[in-house]
């Protein structure tokens, strides 16, 4: 799952990617996942690749990759 965000120096995001953002993107892809099931300890505020856990059931946890890329700046 890819997100494109504005970022400043040091690849630090202006804003963040939250569990709500991830849940909304999953909904667009046809998965109805409650944002509280996404195990994200704090919002993602850096560019890069992250592995996120989603607790689907008491004994079932799925992991997927989230990629945050820098938004292209028009000069």
Image (tube, rainbow, N blue to C red):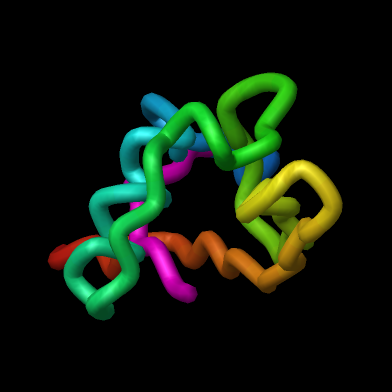
**Front-lying residue, 55 or 8:** 55
In the rendered view, tell whether residue 17 sits above or below residue 59. Answer: above
The quarter holding residue 18 reads top left
Q: Left or right: where does residue 33 sit relative to residue 54? A: left
Where does the image place residue 67, in percent across and percent down from the top left? 58, 68
Q: Left or right: where does residue 67 sit relative to residue 23? A: right
Disc tally is 0
Which residue ends up furthest to the front in the rendered image? 58
Q: Left or right: where does residue 8 sit relative to residue 21? A: right
Which residue ends up furthest to the right in the rendered image? 59
Where does the image place residue 39, in percent across and percent down from the top left? 69, 36
Q: Which residues are magenta?
A: 1-8
Quadrant where the C terminus sits is: bottom left
**Front-lying residue, 42 or 39:** 39
In the rendered view, tell whether residue 48 sits above or below residue 13. Answer: below
**Residue 2 is covered by the magenta coloring:** yes
Query: Looking at the image, which residue is at 60% across and 36% down?
Result: 44
Query: Looking at the image, which residue is at 38% across and 40% down?
Result: 34
**Residue 58 is covered by the magenta coloring:** no
Where does the image place residue 71, in percent across and percent down from the top left? 32, 62
Where does the image place residue 24, in percent across and percent down from the top left? 25, 51
Query: Looking at the image, which residue is at 26% across and 78% down?
Result: 29
Q: Left or right: where does residue 60 sit relative to residue 29? A: right
């Amino acid at each position: 799952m890819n997100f494109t965000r504005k970022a400043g120096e040091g690849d630090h995001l202006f804003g963040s990617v939250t569990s709500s953002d991830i849940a909304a993107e999953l909904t667009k892809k046809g998965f109805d996942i409650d944002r509280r099931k996404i195990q994200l300890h704090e919002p993602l505020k850096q560019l890069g690749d992250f592995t996120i856990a989603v607790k689907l059931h008491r004994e079932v946890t799925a992991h997927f990759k989230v990629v945050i890329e820098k938004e292209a700046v028009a000069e």
